[in-house]
């Protein structure tokens, strides 16, 4: 099979590439390396089954040519991360929606039989205070100028684009609502909490807890995430469906800080920062976020294999190794 991964040099994208190359598939990626990194794909660059197109997905002149050659597309290219979103909301609005539309137009024109999986996000559940989210839950977005939600709006737009192209052009689409994903190659630069805490703990710097730390998240190891995405893409029953993808083990940010600190044997203190201090503005903090995974399980039989503890140990040892080589 020939697979196209947009945003293939990104954190999740590069794990999808590794997964498919290991299975013997051909993989092409397009990435402009804005948030993705050449380091993420370095191990594949000399693999004859791998092709890297360095281009902005909005302008890539070979999009149709490559789309016409592939059986499957994972559309992962997007601007992500709360800090990145607040830093440049105009780019988020422009890129995330237009890129998805461009990909779907190309598929409809030259490869309408391709299978497309798009990366939506748990952010679309918005300010719904329920905590455990299932796919049929209402979307609650706050009105007023809260820039945080522009990312959710783009991902919702992507979902509706997917439905429109499914309805009008008969394209096979799975919409994966990705919950917090962690693992090797994720960077903390744009706010992601786990790589930030791991770096801080290993370097004996203070762990920065935003708010009171009682907010909870459920973290899924990316090596589980890519298995779930592949299973969904291969499952005819998942065609046309919105499906939560994640791990439902829930932990408070304070407990996470304590766990990372303990596993790293760190003596770092905790510092508590208000949202304003952390992000430079007030944002609507999501107090609880946990995926309800019944649909994913029913469609694919998927069960995550990685425990949070094992991922943290793995990330701590990778960070130590990174420090030894710099
Ligand atoms: N967070 C934190 N310290 C950090 C970075 C993030 O306490 O250095 C908190 C953040 O406020 C949020 C949670 O950790 O409550 C998860 O943040 P992340 O940006 O990783 O994901 P998201 O908010 O999109 O779920």
Image (cartoon, grey):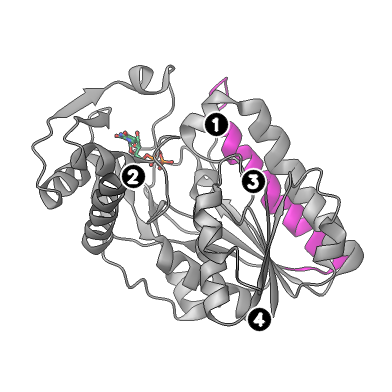
Q: Which residue is mark 3?
A: 156
- Judged by depth in the image, the label closer to the viewer, 4 or 1, is 1
- Judged by depth in the image, the label closer to the viewer, 1 or 2, is 2
- Judged by depth in the image, the label closer to the viewer, 2 or 3, is 2
Give the vertical position of 120 relative to 203 (above or below).
Answer: below
Q: Measured from the top left, where is residue 131 in percent x and y?
A: 36, 48
Q: Nearer the viewer, residue 298 or 138?
A: 298
- Quarter location, residue 30: bottom right
SS category of the residue bearing label 3 = helix
Mark 1 vs 2, N-terminal side? 1
As measured in the structure, the alpha-carbon distance from the residue carrying label 1 to the one carrying label 3 is 15 Å
- Judged by depth in the image, the label closer to the viewer, 1 or 3, is 1
Give, as a single range, the part of the protein colored magenta: 143-172
Give the vertical position of 179 relative to 173 (above or below).
Answer: above
Q: Quadrant of the N terminus?
A: bottom right
Q: Which residue is mark 4?
A: 236
Are discs 1 and 3 less than 8 Å apart at CB?
Answer: no
* Secondary structure character of the magenta stretch overall: helix
């Amino acid at each position: 099979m020939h697979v196209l991964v947009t945003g293939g040099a990104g954190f999740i994208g590069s794990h999808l590439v590794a997964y498919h190359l290991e299975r013997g598939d051909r993989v092409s990626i397009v990435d402009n390396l804005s948030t993705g990194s050449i380091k993420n794909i370095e191990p594949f660059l000399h693999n004859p089954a791998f092709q890297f197109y360095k281009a902005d997905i909005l302008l890539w002149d070979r999009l149709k040519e490559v789309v016409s050659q592939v059986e499957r597309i994972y559309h992962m290219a997007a601007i992500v991360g709360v800090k990145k979103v607040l830093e440049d909301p105009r780019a988020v609005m422009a890129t995330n929606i237009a890129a998805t539309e461009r990909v779907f137009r190309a598929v409809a024109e030259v490869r309408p039989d391709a299978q497309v999986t798009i990366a939506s996000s748990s952010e679309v559940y918005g300010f719904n205070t329920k905590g455990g989210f299932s796919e049929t839950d209402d979307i609650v977005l706050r009105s007023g100028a809260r820039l945080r939600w522009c990312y959710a709006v783009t991902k919702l737009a992507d979902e509706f684009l997917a439905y429109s192209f499914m309805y009008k052009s008969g394209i096979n689409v799975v919409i994966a609502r990705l919950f917090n994903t962690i693992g090797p190659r994720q960077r903390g630069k744009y706010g992601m909490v786990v790589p930030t805490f791991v770096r801080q703990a290993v370097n004996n710097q203070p762990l920065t807890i935003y708010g009171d730390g009682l907010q909870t998240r459920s973290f899924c190891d990316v090596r589980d995430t890519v298995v779930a995405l592949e299973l969904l893409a291969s499952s005819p029953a998942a065609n046309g469906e919105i499906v939560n993808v994640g791990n439902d083990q829930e932990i408070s940010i304070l407990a996470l800080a304590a766990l990372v600190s303990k596993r790293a044997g760190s003596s770092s203190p905790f510092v508590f920062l208000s949202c304003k201090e952390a992000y430079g503005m007030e944002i609507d903090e999501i107090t609880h976020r946990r995926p309800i995974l019944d649909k994913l399980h029913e469609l694919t039989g998927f069960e995550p294999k990685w425990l949070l503890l094992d991922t943290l140990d793995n990330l701590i040892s990778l960070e130590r190794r990174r420090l030894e080589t710099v």
